[in-house]
Amino acid sequence: MRWTDRQRAMLLEMGIRLGPEPPGAEPVAVVAPPAAEPVAVPAAVRDGAAPAAQPPAAVAAPPPATAAPVAFVSTTRVAHMDWPELRATVAGCTACRLCQGRTQTVFGVGHLQADWMIVGEAPGEQEDRQGEPFVGKSGQLLGNMLRAIGLTREDAPATQQVYIANTLKCRPPGNRNPQPDELAQCEPYLIRQVALVQPKIILAMGSFAVQSLLRNTEPIGRLRGRVHDYHGVPLIVTYHPAYLLRRPEEKARAWDDLCLAVETARQAAK
Ligand code: URA
């Protein structure tokens, strides 16, 4: 891949320095020395600091105020819902304890036919307040990562504008780690979002998202670097932006993951 000046600038924003680019050669991200395997991002630091101003994403319709509460998730019913019904069902969901502490559910935003679907872990404090995924500090880095590969969360055609969702639609209290039963209760919603969007690729970010989607307890370091499958869609694993903020030396690996995802999406589009 040859970088445009714009991409170089974006890579710099991601904190990635490119190695020397000999004439005709593929530039290579400067790879950081091996680091310890990351563990699941402790929730308290998942999306720590100050909120970043983000313009509203394309599809962030507020949930209908009249959504009927759902005390349990019928996977079969959810699997047949259209967007409005799914959105309303999520907004009224009381299937697990997380409904008690939330300000609102965080459904997902973006192009409803996006080629790329980004799946994070769970809403943090800012997301719970604003009802939109990745609006905090890690959302800023996610935006930079997306721009570096020509994607955006802003209004754009389906080839460029991503759809962003989380494995959990409600904020765990105090940003604690998601519990397995919470992830299990919430997954039918994500599966339906995937079925409705029909993305060409899923980029799963962070241990909880990755491990719960792949039913695998291995650390991200062992799962990244290859193409997985999630309900028929190629899935690429990478580090959570909040982890990258704490461990910037891992950004080069994240860049490798993005490049693998770009290549995989390209193949899927053929
Ligand atoms: N971290 C996530 O995984 N998702 C969000 O929406 C925000 C922070």
Image (cartoon, rainbow, N blue to C red):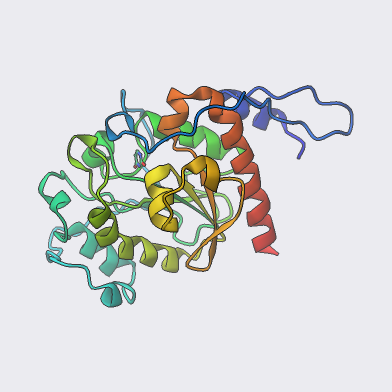
Please tell me which residue is depicted at 69% across the width and 29% down the height of the picture: 29
**Which residue is farthest right?**
23
Query: Percent from the top left, x then y, of residue 175?
Result: 24, 36
Please tell me which residue is depicted at 68% across the width and 56% down the height of the picture: 266
In the rendered structure, the answer to whether residue 217 lies left or right of residue 131 reads right
In the rendered structure, the answer to whether residue 111 lies left or right of residue 270 reads left
Q: Quadrant of residue 69?
A: bottom left
Instruction: Classify 164 as above or below 2.
Output: below
Query: Ligand 1 quadrant?
Result: top left
On the question of residue 21 being in view, the answer is: yes
Query: Percent from the top left, x then y, of residue 85?
Result: 26, 69
| Count of marks placed on residues | 0
On the question of residue 140 being in view, the answer is: no
Please tell me which residue is depicted at 56% across the width and 29% down the height of the picture: 251
Q: Quadrant of residue 256?
A: top right
Instruction: Classify 215 as above or below 43.
Output: below
Q: Quadrant of the N terminus?
A: top right
**Along the line of sight, which residue is nearer the eye, 135 or 263?**
263
**Along the line of sight, which residue is nearer the eye, 242 or 42?**
42
Query: Percent from the top left, x then y, of residue 63?
Result: 22, 56
Instruction: Classify 143 as above or below 113.
Output: above
In the rendered structure, the answer to whether residue 109 lies left or right of residue 172 reads right
Q: Quadrant of the C terminus?
A: bottom right
Query: Percent from the top left, x then y, of residue 55?
Result: 38, 37
Instruction: Classify 134 as above or below 107.
Output: above
**Along the line of sight, which residue is nearer the eye, 37 or 194?**
37
